[in-house]
Amino acid sequence: MATVSIATGMQATPSSSAVAMTSNYVSSADLIASGDTGASLHTRDVDEQLIKRYGNQGITGLMELLGSKKETTANTFEHYEETFLHNSLTGAIDSNGILTVDPTDTDGGDSADNKQSAVRAGDLLLGATGAMYYVAVATDGNTYTLKDVGDGSLAAAGDTEFAIVGNAYAEQTDQGVGLAPKVHHYSNKCQIIKESFVVSGSEATNAVYVKVNSPESGSGYLWYLQGEADTHQRFMDYSELAMIVGESAVGLEDGATNGVGGAVNTTEGLLKFIENKGQSMDLGSSAITMADFDAAVKSLDKFRGSKEMALYAGINLSLDIDDLLASQGAYAAGGANYGTFANNKDMALNLGFNSFSRGGYTFHKKTYDLFNRPDLLGAASFKYNGFGMCIPMDSQKDAKSGEKIPSLRMRYKAANGYSREMEHWLTGGAVLQNKTNGLDELKCNYRTERGFEGFAPNRFLLFKKS
């Protein structure tokens, strides 16, 4: 297979501040160097368009498209989710008919403690072989004496997986032990993200040939506007990256900012949320097959996945899926629906989604640039290069308020009319009409305090590809 290389001298490192340029429309440096005052006064033919050699480099959009936003008044935000109503468990039966439950069994995301406490005397357990067992004695919440329902004898070794399917009691007996519902607890933290750009008063009045645009200051022929625009985009990308690849910090302290120490909070992002709590499929280096998709659909169905999924795929995985489906004519086949896009196929296509159905599940696939960016996650040695993630596209309802809850959302700090979702302000003693200090500079400041919140991780799936 052929490889593609890129020249080594084609990369530049951005600076956090602008320095005075050595030339404007007429270069005094060239006059001194050449000694020919006439040559450097000739008009140069410089196109005013700044060429975007890498296209639109912004990575924002996923959270805006699929998620929602909600303010929080605490650094840590929390919610609770239901566990399985019915429980399964694993364990071993010894020669005396005693079942010892595996204390590490957390199948389906439910805690081992929840499974053990759900087994009571009088319960009926269905074994994986089809044998039915009666819990004659519940000893200590971890061991149980089982009898075979068919002949009343002590259970024999064999089954290691069980499901609680009911109970049975004798006439005129007391009520059995009750079960208190348990819940999954989710919590995450807000992360403070900052960015700044500084330009001197002198550089802010230097004109250049190219016309640049800034979302904050408009367009013009002043190069500092490009620095401000790049800083704004970088800040927005950092904010998005925190929501996607963030990892919860443990024991971090900030001692570098103005000498002020303190704990640093980071938020757990979408990828870690799926890896730590959701479903994963390791594809290795092989191309994805229809059998892989079938396994994904079966697993999603087992754990109540959404019937409509957004599949954000790295370029390698995206091409593999295209090849697989094209060979079977499977795009938009099998009655693919577009409920998320107001049942409008054109809307899905305009957003760059290709849709297909399998086993009653519709996947809206989109190539996710972040997984292929050489300056971010797309470097050949990076873990997430070529990954893909399936994100539920339906909404649940809040039991208390009746409001729809998306599968993911961004939380931001706000209280009493003050919001830290997106803050931007200017300081300095240059450019500004109303100076804030005596420094001969303009400083553009950006700040946000936000965190990622995910719901029902069992409904998400991560495709891992090496």
Image: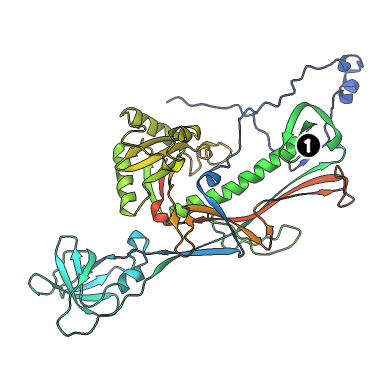
**Closest to the observer, 192 or 255:** 192
Q: Tell me which residue sits at (47%, 65%) in the image.
A: 400
Point out the image quarter for the N terminus.
Answer: top left
What x and y, as percent, mark residue 118? 30, 72
Q: How many marks?
A: 1
Q: Tell me which residue sits at (36%, 51%) in the image.
A: 305
Q: Is residue 246 visible?
A: no
Find numbered disc 1 in the image and state the secondary structure of the residue it sits on.
helix
Q: What residue did someone put label 1 on?
A: 224
Q: Quadrant of residue 388?
A: top left
Q: Tell me which residue sits at (54%, 27%) in the image.
A: 5
What x and y, as percent, mark residue 199? 81, 41
Location of residue 404 with respect to 9 vertically, above or below: below
What x and y, as percent, mark residue 262? 67, 64
Left or right: residue 168 versus residue 427 is: left
Q: Is residue 457 visible?
A: yes
Q: Amino acid at mark 1?
A: Tyr
Left or right: residue 438 versus residue 55 is: right
Q: How are the residues colored? A: rainbow
Circle 1 Cα neighbour tier, 10 Å, few/some/many (<14 / 14–19 / ≥20): many
Left or right: residue 303 versus residue 201 is: left
Q: Quadrant of residue 90?
A: bottom left
Point out the image quarter for the C terminus.
Answer: top left
**Closest to the observer, 6 or 91:** 91
**Closest to the observer, 23 or 47:** 47
What x and y, as percent, mark residue 23? 84, 27
Q: Tell me which residue sits at (14%, 82%) in the image.
A: 171
Left or right: residue 444 versus residue 236 is: right
